Image (tube, helix red, strand yellow):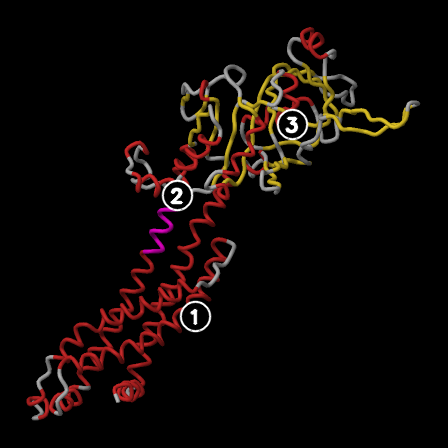
């Protein structure tokens, strides 16, 4: 009987029901769109922010005395301790290994550059050119049998190369099978050296992709004594444009600089690009002050500080520092965008609650005689209120479902226009929206329902 009364009442006064349902659908549609985007905006913006460059830098702990002015690290690049290149695969074994997007070791020295003959057959020499050894499109073989491709092209995707990056195998020796009088054998043939040249340096010496330039240490006699050669030929594969000091440098595979500096298998600095969650007041606390429960919460959250801590655990003897200008900028933007979306959600819910309240109040006024008659026949205030609330909840479920469908369409439009990818519909958002629709309906109808429960049947039936 109760369900029959609810269904019968729901079918009457279709105009009021349509207006209330439309208000709920619009409000829940906006809430659905904002929630869908808000749940994914963090990950999507974090991925976009990776184009700003690495947000962590790893250096030897013995070399950790800070010497920064205006955010620029002035510690010497060729003095102090070094770190083993062979340990870098361990970065993909930390708890948040999936959040490590890219990493690239760096080892630097200075060389003299001799350009090829130009059209006038006059070679150009530039002294003390920064030579940056690093990775580019480097495959790293992980312990689980998979391969992870990384390098400076991943940590700094805004680096623009006119041409191609050098091959990660350039300059290494390759095994070649040969036939000898004694039978089949093999020998090792060095691959040609390759390099990427900075745009300003390329303009200065007139080098272009495909040219061959010569590199030598400033002390050529020492180079002759150590390596038996006074210079190394290097093929230019691309011209690098960054708008920074890299345009005055040469970039080569790291093993080339390791050979020149006699630091085989070592690097001086490591740049890491990681997806992180913006740091809040909790994350900025000293981990030493955490209780065991707080420590687990911090460790299991992708704060940049917790990822830095995990890297330091996997790479002993390192000092992991956050590049604050990048990390804090990301956090501020993410926080503001998410705050804006939550405010939009709250505004949509408030507007829906007001519309439901107005419609519910009008419905109670129109149904005073009906409510008085129900009470005269023995219905209590609780029964009347429960009946009216059930009608409103049924309307909330219908309006919430329609609003969810509208919100998904709106979320796809917003996602494609703003973030370049539409968020995927999820059951979590659906159930949240239905719950919000019920909550908004009950809150908006609270005052009219309270008024309905206080209606006295005698005055109403007498027409007073």
Up/down of 429 relative to 390, above or below: above
Question: What SS does tag 3 mark?
Answer: strand
The numbered mark, 2 or 3, whose residue comes first in the sequence reads 3
User: Where residue 50 is drawn, which disc sits there?
Assistant: none
The residue at the point 10 percent across, 79 percent down is: 454
Magenta part, dominant SS: helix
Is 193 displayed left or right of 147 in the figure? right
Is 61 displayed left or right of 141 in the figure? left
Up/down of 240 relative to 45, above or below: above
Mark 1–mark 2 CB contact (< 8 Å): no
Question: Viewer-nearest of labels 1 and 2?
Answer: 2
Give neighbour class at mark 1: few <14, some 14-19, many 20+ (Cα, 10 Å).
Answer: some
Identify the residue position indicated by label 1 in the image. Answer: 405
The numbered mark, 3 or 1, whose residue comes first in the sequence reads 3
Question: What SS does tag 1 mark?
Answer: helix
Give neighbour class at mark 2: few <14, some 14-19, many 20+ (Cα, 10 Å).
Answer: few
Identify the residue position indicated by label 2 in the image. Answer: 300
Identify the residue position indicated by label 3 in the image. Answer: 253
Residue 289, percent across and down?
Answer: 28, 33
The residue at the point 48 percent across, 32 percent down is: 314
Residue range corresponding to the magenta coloring: 332-342
Work out which quarter of the rendered image holds the N terminus and state it.
Answer: bottom left
Residue 280, percent across and down?
Answer: 32, 41
């Amino acid at each position: 009987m109760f369900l029959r009364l609810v269904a019968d009442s729901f079918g009457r006064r279709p105009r009021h029901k349509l207006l209330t349902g439309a208000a709920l659908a619009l409000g829940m549609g906006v809430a659905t769109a904002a929630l869908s985007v808000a749940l994914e905006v963090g990950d999507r913006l974090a991925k976009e922010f990776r184009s700003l460059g690495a947000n962590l830098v790893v250096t030897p702990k013995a070399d950790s005395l800070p010497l920064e002015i205006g955010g620029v690290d002035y510690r010497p690049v060729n003095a102090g301790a070094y770190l083993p290149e062979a340990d870098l695969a361990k970065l993909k074994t930390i708890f948040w290994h999936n959040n490590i997007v890219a990493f690239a070791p760096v080892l630097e020295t200075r060389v003299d550059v001799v350009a090829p003959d130009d059209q006038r057959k006059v070679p150009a020499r530039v002294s003390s050119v920064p030579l940056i050894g690093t990775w580019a499109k480097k495959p790293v073989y992980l312990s689980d049998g998979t391969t992870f491709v990384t390098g400076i092209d991943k940590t700094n995707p805004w680096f623009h190369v006119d041409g191609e990056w050098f091959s990660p195998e350039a300059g290494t020796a390759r095994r070649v099978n040969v036939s000898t009088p004694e039978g089949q054998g093999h020998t090792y043939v060095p691959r040609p050296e390759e390099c990427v040249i900075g745009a300003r340096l390329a303009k200065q010496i007139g080098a272009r992709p495909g040219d061959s330039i010569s590199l030598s240490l400033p002390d050529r006699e020492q180079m002759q004594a150590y390596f038996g050669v006074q210079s190394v030929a290097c093929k230019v594969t691309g011209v690098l444009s960054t708008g920074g000091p890299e345009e005055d440098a040469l970039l080569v595979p790291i093993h080339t600089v390791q050979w020149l500096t006699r630091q085989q298998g070592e690097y001086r600095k490591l740049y890491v690009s990681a997806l992180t969650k913006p740091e809040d007041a909790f994350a900025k606390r000293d981990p030493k002050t955490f209780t065991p429960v707080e420590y687990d919460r911090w460790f299991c959250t992708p704060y940049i500080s917790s990822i830095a801590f995990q890297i330091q655990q996997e790479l002993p003897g390192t000092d992991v520092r956050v590049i604050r200008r990048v990390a804090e900028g990301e956090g501020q933007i993410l926080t503001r965008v998410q705050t804006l979306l939550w405010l939009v959600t709250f505004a949509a819910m408030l507007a829906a609650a007001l519309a439901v309240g107005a419609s519910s109040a009008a419905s109670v006024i129109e149904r005073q005689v009906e409510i008085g008659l129900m009470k005269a026949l023995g219905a209590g205030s609780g029964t009347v209120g429960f009946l009216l609330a059930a009608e409103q909840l049924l309307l909330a479920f219908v309006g919430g479902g329609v609003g969810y469908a509208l919100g998904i369409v709106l979320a796809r439009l917003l996602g494609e226009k703003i973030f370049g990818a539409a968020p995927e519909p999820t059951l979590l958002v659906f159930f949240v929206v239905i719950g919000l629709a019920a909550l908004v309906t009950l809150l908006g109808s609270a005052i009219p329902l309270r008024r309905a429960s206080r209606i006295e049947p005698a005055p109403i039936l007498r027409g007073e």
